[in-house]
Image: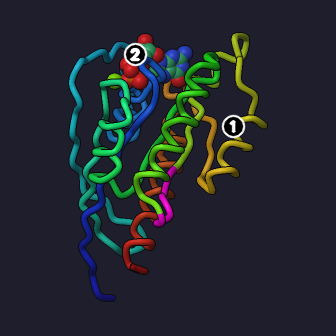
Amino acid sequence: HQQHHTKLRVVVLGAPSVGKSALTVRYLTRRYISEYRRAVNLLYRHTICLDDVTSHVEILDVSQRGKERILTSHARWGEGFVVVYSVDDASTFVEARVILDALQRAKAPLYVPAVLLANKRDLDAGRQVSVEEGQALSLQHGCQFHEVSAAESHVGITIAFQSLLRETRSLRQAR
Ligand code: GDP
Ligand code: MG
């Protein structure tokens, strides 16, 4: 089996405090760090072997709020995108839609490999965004959708990142 080496760039976007840093650290370390407030963007590198293919992955955990101009530069840099909102805050869902729209505009006419993550599903008592609304948004943008909780488990997060990486990689190979 021939080994391919690819480099994949992933950007994690979303409103402040939706759990972007917690999710990213969960994916990379399987640990949950509950207070992870930093005012800077962080770039993580790791190597992953999926289906016999080794990929060098760079993950940019974005900290500043996405003005359109900043979003456009992240869209150019990235190849795959994790767009996060929090199920207990409807305004973050609105922002997720704005981000997905901006990514599509920036990449058009190319298809944008993305996963929409509804985080903090453990906060069900304070839920403001239904599963159905999340699914509908993902269908409108043709992206994957998962409800997760960085606080509760790494499992769904790992599945989501890995399927995004697979999709990003196969799209790259097709181009
Ligand atoms: P970011 O600004 O999007 O990077 O968000 P952070 O990762 O810094 O998380 C913001 C806050 O939400 C922190 O207090 C986290 O402890 C909390 N948080 C993150 N993920 C979850 C989750 O799945 N459930 C709950 N209940 N809180 C979470
Ligand atoms: Mg953060």
Number of the label disc, if any, that sits on residue 134? 1
Asked if residue 82 lies left or right of residue 48, the reply is: right
- The three-letter code of the residue at mark 2 reads Ser
Q: Is mark 1 on a helix, strand or loop?
A: helix
| Of marks 2 and 1, the one in the foreground | 1
The earlier-in-sequence mark between 2 and 1 is: 2
Neighbours of disc 1 within 10 Å: few (<14), some (14-19), many (20+): many
**The N terminus - image quarter:** bottom left
Task: Check mark 2 vs ligand 1: CB closer than 8 Å? yes or no.
Answer: yes
Seen in the image, is 110 located left or right of residue 117? left
Does residue 22 sit above or below 106 in this rendering?
above
> How many residues crowd mark 2 within 10 Å: few (<14), some (14–19), many (20+)?
few
Magenta segment, prevailing SS (helix, strand or loop): loop
User: As shown in the figure, which amino acid type bears the numbered disc 1?
Assistant: Gly
| Residue 48: % across, % down | 31, 59
Residue 44 lies, in percent from the top left, at 22, 42
Residue at horizontal 40 percent and vertical 52 percent from the top: 106
Residue labelled with disc 2: 34
Q: Give the range drawn in magenta.
A: 109-114
Cα separation, mark 2 vs mark 1, equals: 24 Å
Indicate the quadrant of ligand 2 in the picture: top left
Is residue 145 toward the left or the right of residue 60 in the image? Answer: right
